[in-house]
Amino acid sequence: MTPPPGWYRDPSAPHLERWWDGTAWTEHRRIPEPAGYGPAAGGAPGP
């Protein structure tokens, strides 16, 4: 089963998160927010 679209740890740069579009990694990356910050369950919106 394929993971749903969302921000995940970047397999090529573990200190970053990368957007998974549901079928492939995109070029969008970001620095992860510290735990307890940012949007509640469901994560941040996509790129």
Image: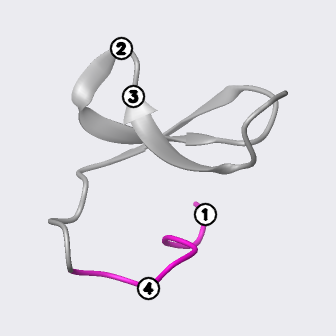
Asked which secondary structure carries label 3, the reply is: strand
Q: In front: 29, or 34?
A: 34
Region in magenta: 37-47
Return the residue at label 4: 40
12 displayed left or right of 20: left
Of callouts 2 and 1, the N-terminal one? 2
Indicate yes or no whether the magenta region holds residue 41. Answer: yes
17 displayed left or right of 23: left
Q: Residues within 10 Å of mark 4 (few under 14, many from 20)?
A: few
Q: What whole-number distance in Å separates the C-alpha atoms at marks 4 and 2? A: 27 Å
Return the residue at label 3: 10
Q: Residues within 10 Å of mark 1 (few under 14, many from 20)?
A: few
Return the residue at label 1: 46
Q: What whole-number distance in Å separates the C-alpha atoms at marks 1 and 4? A: 14 Å
Amino acid type shown at disc 4 = Ala
Amino acid type shown at disc 2 = Ser
Q: What whole-number distance in Å separates the C-alpha atoms at marks 3 and 2? A: 5 Å
Residue at image point 38% right, 35% down: 9
Asked which secondary structure carries label 2, the reply is: loop
Labels 1 & 4 near each other (Cβ < 8 A): no
Of callouts 3 and 1, the N-terminal one? 3
Residue at image point 58% right, 74% down: 42
**Which is in the foreground here, disc 4 or disc 2?**
4
Return the residue at label 2: 12
